[in-house]
Amino acid sequence: MSESENEQKLASELKSRILETQERNKLKRLLTKRLRDCGWKDKIKKRCVDKIRTEGVENIKLDQLEEYVLKHGREAVPDDVKVEMLQQISSYLDKHVSQLEKNIK
Amino acid sequence: MTSKGNSKNSQRKVKQKKQNTDKKMVTVDNHVKMTSNIEPGLLKQNDISPVKGKQNKSLKKGIKRKAEDSHAINETFQVSNAAVSHPKMSQKVGCRHLEKYKGDRPDYLDNFKTIAELSMRWYKIGIPRENKMLMHQKCSECSLKGDRLHACLDCVFIGCWRGESHARKHYKNTHHTFATDVQRLEIFCFRCGDYIYDIDYDNVKKHEEVRAEEKESDIKEPARKRARYVPWRPTEEESERIKRNSTPFPCSGLRGLLNMGATCFMNAVLQTFMHNPIIKNYFMTDKHNKNICGTSGCMCCEVDNLFQEFHSGEKKPYPPCSFLQSMWLSSKELAGYSEQDAHEFYLAAINKMHGDSHETKHQELNANIQNCECIMHKTFGGCFQSRIKCSQCDMSSDREEHMVEWQLHLRGLVTNQKKKNGTKGSQESNSSEMDVDKNSLEDCLDRYCEKEQLPGFKCEDCEIRLLNEDDSSEKAKDSVNSCSRTTTCKKLPPVLTFVVERFHRASTKTNTIKNEAEFEFPEEIDMAKWTSRGHDVLEKGGTLDDLPNYKYNLLSVVNHEGKINTGHYTVYCKSRDRWFLFDDHAVKCASVEEVLQSKRKAYLCFYVADTLEYDQPNIN
């Protein structure tokens, strides 16, 4: 098997494993909690409400609203939250990648 | 209880109905009986036995039955919503597409009901067992789980929203216009491109929510049978009768404390704790349960007990005997029947509760008190910063100091007391004449944060430099005297405690004197000026507008009346936006003006922050 094929297989294995073991949900829960605690959620909500107020409820669609907050929202996530999430993900990967590699070989 | 959609009024009515006349009770019983006939069927359906075929059948049955009740519910909800009609909410049908859809399909609610029921099982009740019905909680195309899944209302399809958006693709392929968010149960119209509100769907959702709660309690406490949810709305005659025969439920949380022999100092401080929103939240959410803790002499348990007593609905004044006992056991200075200082009690209570709290159990003894997780330090703990600055070499050093109170020095002793009792000092009485009426809270804070010259203090950097240079002795003297100190508040606590230093001792030889100068305090105060951040901004010539909200509102005032040796403590507290005067066992209504008038008596002032800050995320 070539290198890239191996990698692809590994990636799909990992993906399904993350989904099966509920790791994704766990991470998501952690992220939502952090974002709520640091006020990010309220900030974004306020931004949405302001936008709806200025445009009028009838004149704005979900897609437009999403577009309006998406970029801003990404940037507004505090750096330490990002760092923590990355740490969590990489520690999970460290645990499982080597094991999976063995299985594939 | 009727569902959440009803107005508060009707909820209260239902409550009151229970306390109503006997005749009324009979009709209620009938009502329950009528519905309880259906119960066996429903109960079976409630059982979450994962038997495949049967489940489906019983599910369908359940839906039919529910369709019957939900018609009744729909009617009642419509009535109630009409009664509380809100101008913006008057449109009960989501959009014109939905209106047409409803007209075409008389069974339009059926699919939604099934989805709602499954969703409740999945997200609310959370059944541990693997169940075939629950396997659908992932995207039908890519089997992605739990990412804003939307279920089609026309066929069995669940699609993901983000990324490839199989839900949207499904719409493009099949033109099924409506989908519902599986978790939130909101209806999305693909033709409008937006979520819509529809009263029929909403009623079904509310109904399912109540049912889910019932099931949950069935699973968690199978022994305790909960009364089934029965929609009920009083007729005009009935509501008239309810109004006539019921008395409003008295407000709880207000109770006098008996004086156990010169314990008014304790009663006053305890009342402020009882009406402190943060402490109240902590204990009312069962964070420290006395039945679980069970440590004897635990001060937190005693406070928990007080909260129970205060909200028990009992109106008689409560004797805080066990509280007093554990106080006596824990601190010897406060034991006995002599009169004590409320401020000392306040400090002692904080220390004791800090020691007894669950949060500190695993903490090391010398752990940093600033990051203490105990309720008292989280509520009252802030931090001062004192900065020493040398004007010669621009050296500055900061020191942080933990605080649970802000001591305010009153200027000017009030003369009557002074002349009678005081033996010392024409100096002070002179100065008191000079700054009369300069004792508002703002003035005191200004004075606290004023730059203070430190004549004897030697700046280290300058000293070293002088040793090296060694030539200009004149400059040396200058720099030695050029240091100054400013104290500002680095971290404001959620509840600020101001202690007015009324008990003054001029020197060790003289007796302590009570200062009865007027101390004016406002109902609300913006603390920005006295924070370290605000101070820095002002020094650089900026404005305070960009700073976060540092507004504080008056919460309670402890007053001391009488002389130094003997006196009486009373306290004004704000409860549910109204002021009350607590004088041991007596509780009286008070007005804000009255509270602000107690200038000469105020001893402890508690202010609560207008907005609470978010937690800063901490790594490690």
Image (cartoon, rainbow, N blue to C red):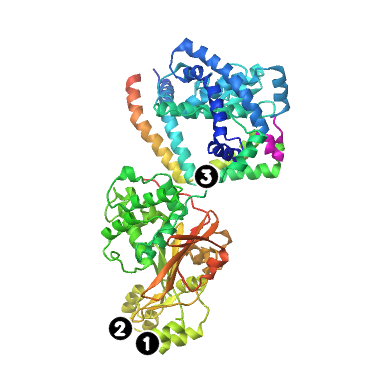
Q: Is residue B182 visible?
A: no
Which structural element holds mark 1? loop
Amino acid beneath label 3:
Trp
Name the chain under label 3: A
Quarter holding the N terminus of chain A is top left
Horizontal and vertical percent position of residue A17: 40, 24
Label 3 sits on residue: A40
Tell me if residue B152 is in the magenta stretch: no
Whether residue B448 is situated above or below residue B575 in the rendered picture: below
Quadrant in the picture for residue A60: top right
Horizontal and vertical percent position of residue A72: 58, 43
Could you say which disc has been placed on residue B424 in the image? 1
Relative side of B92 to B146, left or right:
right
Tell me if residue B86 is in the magenta stretch: yes
Label 2 sits on residue: B509
> Quick check: marks 1 and 2 in contact, CB under 8 Å?
yes
Q: Which residues are magenta?
A: B80-92
Question: Which mark is nearer the camera, 2 or 3?
Answer: 2
Residue drawn at (49%, 18%), measured in percent from left and top?
Answer: B40
Q: Is residue B513 visible?
A: yes
Q: Earlier in the sequence, mark 1 or mark 2?
A: 1
